[in-house]
Amino acid sequence: MDRMKGKVVLVTGAGSGIGKASAILLAKEGAKVVLTDIQTDTLNTTVSEIEAFQGEAIGIKLNVSDEEEWIATIQKAVGTFGTINVLVNSAGISSQFDTTEEWKRLLNINLTGSYLGMKQVIPIMKQDGGSIVNIASLAGLVGGGFNGYTASKGGIRSISRAAAVDYAKDKIRVNSIYPGLIITPMTEGILYHNVLKQKFEEKTPLPRFGTPEDIAFGVLYLASEESSFVTGTELVIDGGTTAS
Ligand SMILES: NC(=O)c1ccc[n+]([C@@H]2O[C@H](COP(=O)([O-])OP(=O)(O)OC[C@H]3O[C@@H](n4cnc5c(N)ncnc54)[C@H](O)[C@@H]3O)[C@@H](O)[C@H]2O)c1
């Protein structure tokens, strides 16, 4: 219950799916959690769920692709809890469309959004060290999907490794997570699409799809001191997909 005691964590995309499950688990483990999302209704729901078990949380509306909003969010977070020890970049979008406009939108939210969070939080983490956990995707590791989503997730992989090396001397660890198919509002439509569902089932050796909590446990490990010698790593949580 206290693997994150004394730590301040900022989570993006905390209103839904993987970001929400991670924020709740980290709060249950004693972290003070700064929840952010572009959608305030779902964000406020997560805050209430954490307060219901006496967890400590504040919610701040943040569009991750807006640097000014990042600056204001971090000021408010530090003003409330004193520092930021952990950043979890989970906010993201996927897309059905394959246009140049959509390519730019995906890179802007998924990749630039993660970059801006890292850029703004690193100066604070330099005081005391810290842990950054970036949610990438199998799309950033393996082939298939010539589009902006793949590019954004491959970019997250590259900047995570680069920052891990550049900021190791400051005791800032940077790791990335590669989820397989996790059932969240982003992906649940697949369950109602027989052909797609079967395709994913065939690609997943373990006989189920992932849950947001499967990823949250990986986030908890990388956020906590238990992984204090782990940086630049790429944690695949995919039911065996990339192994097969
Ligand atoms: N679900 C999967 O199968 C899966 C697989 C691999 C990677 N991922 C990645 O995991 C992360 C979380 O996805 P999820 O499945 O939980 O999706 P989700 O749709 O349930 O949650 C994403 C959250 O990000 C927020 N968001 C979207 N645009 C934003 C913006 N501009 N600024 C701030 N917040 C914004 C949304 O409001 C939402 O709350 C994403 O980066 C996604 O690419 C998901």
Image (cartoon, helix red, strand yellow):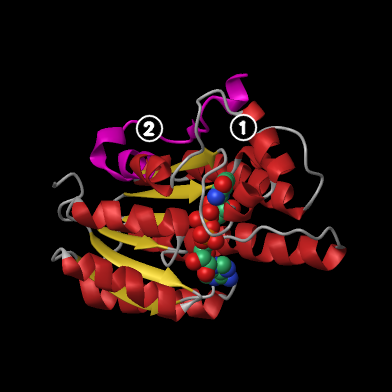
Q: Residue at x 61, y 25 (%)?
A: 242
In the displayed structure, does residue 93 sit left or right of residue 105? left
Q: Residue furthest top?
A: 244
The numbered dot on residue 201 is 1
Query: Which quadrant of the picture is home to ligand 1?
Result: bottom right
Examine the structure image and report whether residue 187 is included in the region drawn in magenta. Answer: no
User: What's the residue at 42%, 43% (across, down)?
Assistant: 215
From the viewer's perspective, is residue 184 above or below residue 16? Answer: above
Q: Residues within 10 Å of mark 2 (few under 14, many from 20)?
A: some
Residue that mark 2 sits on? 230
Disc 2 or 1, which lies upstream in sequence?
1
Q: Examine the rendered structure and indicate whether residue 17 appears above or below residue 3.
A: below
Residues drawn in magenta: 218-244
Please, is residue 147 above or below residue 65 in the view? above
Specify the farthest residue to the right. 99
Cβ of disc 2 within 8 Å of ligand 1?
no
The answer to whether residue 136 is seen in the rendering is no
- Numbered-mark total: 2
- Percent x, y for residue 35? 36, 68
